[in-house]
Amino acid sequence: MTLRNRAGRRLGITDPAPDLSWSDAGDAYQVQLSDSASFASFLADSGRVPGAPLWVPWPGPELTSRQRVHWRVRVETGGSWGDWQHDWVEAGLLSSSDWTAVPSRARRRRAHHGSPVR
């Protein structure tokens, strides 16, 4: 399971709606998104989608900064569903307003001789 243009990364991504891909091909697929690894509730459920595309558009609401979403997919082949494959993704800071900075004062360290080190 992978995200488009992420090179294996799933933490701190900058795309709020990454395309999804997986290795199993079949006649149909189903993708579910959840805010918990237990999938007790869903943010989105694609239901049965016919076809086996290489890349699937993000099936739910866009990610927000620092949001972690668990996703799983299963593939139907010959009328039978395979097992769920699980993964997760976490957004980085997506908006410039998420970035804040506070000026820091340069601390002067004293060397053994008592003179400042710069």
Image (tube, rainbow, N blue to C red):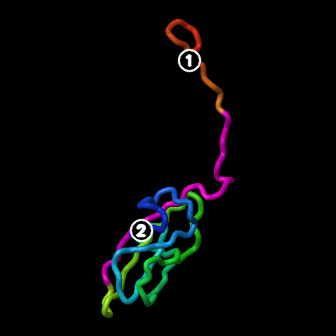
Which residue sits at x=48%, y=78%? 56
Q: Residue 91 magenta-drawn?
A: yes
Q: Nearer the viewer, residue 23 or 59?
A: 23
Circles 2 and 1, Cβ within 8 Å, touching? The answer is: no
Relative to 84, 50 lies left or right:
right
Q: Which numbered tag is attached to residue 2?
A: 2
Q: x, y percentage for residue 111?
A: 52, 12
Which residue sits at x=66%, y=46%? 100
Amino acid type at circle 1 is Arg
Amino acid type at circle 2 is Thr
Q: Considering the image in quadrants, where does the N terminus appear?
A: bottom left
- On screen, residue 99 above or below 94: above
Q: x, y percentage for residue 112?
A: 50, 9
Q: x, y percentage for residue 85?
A: 35, 73
Q: Nearer the viewer, residue 113 or 25?
A: 25
Residue that numbered label 1 is attached to: 109
Residue found at the far bottom of this picture: 79
Q: Quadrant of residue 92?
A: bottom right
Q: Residue 31 magenta-drawn?
A: no
- On screen, residue 87 above or below 73: above
Q: Secondary structure at mark 2?
A: strand
Q: Secondary structure at mark 1?
A: strand
Q: Considering the image in quadrants, where does the C terminus appear?
A: top right
Q: x, y percentage for residue 73?
A: 40, 77
Which residue sits at x=46%, y=86%? 47
Relative to 9, 24 lies left or right:
left
- On screen, residue 63 above or below 58: above
Label 1 CA crowd tier, 10 Å (few <14, some 14–19, many 20+)? few
Label 2 CA crowd tier, 10 Å (few <14, some 14–19, many 20+)? some
- The span shown in magenta is 82-103
